[in-house]
Image (tube, rainbow, N blue to C red):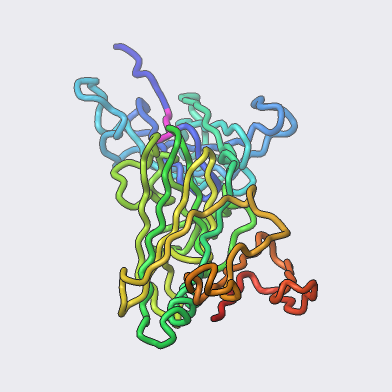
């Protein structure tokens, strides 16, 4: 009688901390129980050396589980020869290679699994997988113009409150290359320390953490998929459009809008458009969003309401500045009258200044 080949497999090769590894062991005897063990191979990447970290093992009964999702039709493996289980990747596994072992185990004299007298029978299968850090972003963007500030500017232009809540947003992201990964960090609940590698509590989950960091393009829709996409992959020329309707004052909800942070592993282009209720698109604004690599510390405002009417035919009856900081604690000084006196000093994350 031919010996059944024993194997253990994971649903993919690489994971991030906080993700779930779906595991299937095949080919073990129908009456066996399986002990699973994950070992972090440490810096040397070798099993059985001093820097290994052995995570707690666990046992799964093999008698009541149906066919493995990895089984193909006609392979003649009995239904009882497959065991399915899961393992949650801990933070300590980041940037590591992990060894997964499945080994048949039977209860000892006490007839209880999970006790000291359990006996490993020798039937074993092993594989490896990785917990690699996500690639770092080459661009960082902050979406300008928070909705209260945009509404303030629109009302300043009209001189009345006809422009009203809510604000309609369209944020467009255009990818240049295949394989781009985009990290999207909602501004409403603050920014994470590492946008490319959020902790399990910081990463997006549609049910438990809708305001978490979304990762688009990594072929793992559990941590987010770009709106309008069918698969979680980003291709050259793909345009992602984010739309939202944001009440002012805000209601504490999570929306695509001003103040959001975006990271991209390959070059992308970003634009931001918005308008209010009332005039709707008859009074709207749209800007190209620059990544922080093009930001600076010294600016000259090119136009203003102080330009003589004979020069500009009153083209600029209202001007406004939206000033956004890249880092917390930033301050800025403003010389309103271009007379060398910097009297308006502020330290907020973003300030909107406008006047007639």
In percent of width and height, residue 57 lies at 54, 42
Residue beneath the point at 58% across and 50% down: 291
Which residue lies at the image location 47% right of the left edge and 70% below the top edge? 315
Closer to us: 266 or 214: 266
Side of 287 relative to 77 (left or right): right
Residue name at image x 52 percent, y 53 percent = 262
* Residue 255, x across and y down, in percent: 42, 67
Q: Which of 256 and 220 is in front in this view?
A: 256
User: Overall secondary structure of the magenta stretch?
Assistant: strand
Q: Where is residue 15 in the image (x, y as percent from the top left)?
A: 50, 40
* Start-end of magenta stretch: 8-12
Q: In which quarter of the image is the N terminus?
A: top left
Residue 79 shows up from this direction: yes
The question of residue 264 being in magenta is answered with no
Location of the C terminus (image quadrant): bottom right
Count of number-bearing discs:
0
Q: Which residue sits furthest bottom?
A: 160
Give the percent coordinates (x, y) of residue 91.
Answer: 61, 49
Tell me the quarter of the picture where residue 235 sits. Answer: top left
The answer to which image quadrant residue 319 occupies is bottom right
Q: Residue at x 43, y 29 (%)?
A: 8
Q: Is residue 269 above or below residue 335?
A: above
């Amino acid at each position: 009688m031919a010996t059944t080949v024993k194997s253990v497999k994971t649903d993919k090769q690489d994971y991030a901390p906080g993700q779930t590894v779906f595991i299937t062991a095949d080919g073990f005897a129908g009456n066996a129980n399986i002990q699973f063990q994950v070992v972090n191979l440490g810096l040397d990447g070798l099993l059985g050396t001093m820097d290994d970290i052995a995570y707690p093992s666990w046992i799964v009964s093999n008698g009541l589980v149906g066919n493995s999702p990895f089984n193909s039709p006609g392979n003649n493996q009995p239904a009882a020869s497959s065991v399915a289980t899961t393992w949650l990747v801990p933070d300590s596994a980041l940037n590591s290679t992990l060894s997964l072992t499945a080994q048949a185990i039977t209860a000892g004299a006490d007839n209880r699994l999970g006790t000291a007298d359990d006996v490993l029978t020798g039937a074993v299968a092993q594989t490896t997988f990785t917990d690699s850090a996500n690639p770092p972003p080459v661009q960082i963007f902050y979406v300008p113009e928070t909705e209260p500030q945009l509404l303030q500017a629109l009302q300043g232009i009209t001189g009345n409150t006809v422009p009203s809540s809510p604000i309609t947003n369209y944020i467009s992201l255009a990818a240049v290359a295949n394989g781009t990964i985009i990290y999207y960090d909602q501004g409403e609940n603050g920014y994470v320390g590492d946008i490319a590698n959020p902790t399990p509590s910081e990463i997006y989950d549609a049910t438990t953490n809708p305001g978490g960091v979304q990762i688009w393009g990594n072929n793992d829709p559990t941590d987010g998929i770009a709106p309008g996409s069918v698969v979680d992959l980003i291709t050259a020329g793909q345009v992602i459009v984010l739309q939202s309707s944001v009440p002012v004052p805000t209601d504490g909800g999570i929306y695509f809008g001003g103040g959001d942070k975006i990271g991209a592993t390959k070059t992308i282009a970003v634009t931001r458009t918005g308008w209010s209720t009332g005039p709707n698109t008859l009074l709207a604004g749209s800007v190209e969003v620059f990544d922080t690599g093009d930001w600076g510390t010294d600016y000259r405002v090119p136009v203003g309401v102080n330009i003589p009417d004979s020069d500009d035919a009153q083209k600029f009856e209202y001007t406004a500045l939206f000033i956004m900081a890249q880092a917390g604690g930033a301050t800025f000084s403003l010389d309103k009258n271009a007379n060398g006196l910097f009297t308006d000093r502020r330290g907020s994350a973003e300030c909107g200044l406008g006047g007639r």
